[in-house]
Amino acid sequence: MAYTTFDPNNTQAEITLSSGNLTATVNSAGTNFLSLSTATPQSTGKWYCEFTITKPVGGAFLLGLVPDGFTASDVPGFTTTSYGLYHDGTFYNNGGGVDTFA
């Protein structure tokens, strides 16, 4: 099985990648909306991803699905072409909470 890894060229400085770019660690508390993306965008077929969040900085996190070309300075769920799931279960698109998962 080939894994899609995080892209070290599209990762903010506050994030350290390890374990062959499969693990991302935030280095500084209090930093908001840090982003990173995968090295191999997927556009066809079925996709599967799995995340384990062991210690969210400040208790918050946001996971997202974004289009190819999305940069580390962008926030998933705050553009018309991206989607983000916030730690409280709110699903975002275009900057607004559009649904809640409990």
Image (tube, helix red, strand yellow):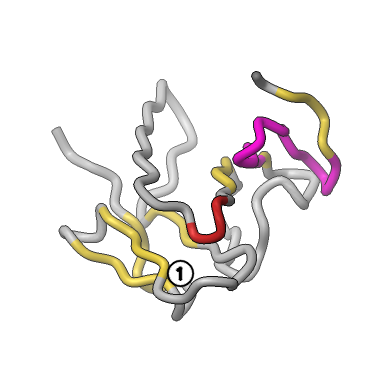
The image shows residue 74 at horizontal and vertical percentages of 66, 63
Q: Secondary structure at mark 1?
A: strand
The residue at 45%/80% (across/down) is: 13
The amino acid type found where label 1 is placed reads Asn
Left or right side of 2 for 8: right
Question: Residue under circle 1?
Answer: 10
The residue at 55%/67% (across/down) is: 72
Does the stretch in magenta take in 48?
A: no
Range shown magenta: 84-96
Looking at the magenta stretch, what is its main secondary structure? Answer: strand
Q: Alpha-carbon neighbours of circle 1 within 10 Å: few (<14), some, or many (≥20)?
A: some
Front in this rendered view, residue 92 or 44: 92
Q: Is residue 46 above or below residue 6?
A: above
The image shows residue 33 at horizontal and vertical percentages of 62, 63
Front in this rendered view, residue 19 or 39: 19
The image shows residue 23 at horizontal and vertical percentages of 27, 55
The image shows residue 75 at horizontal and vertical percentages of 67, 58
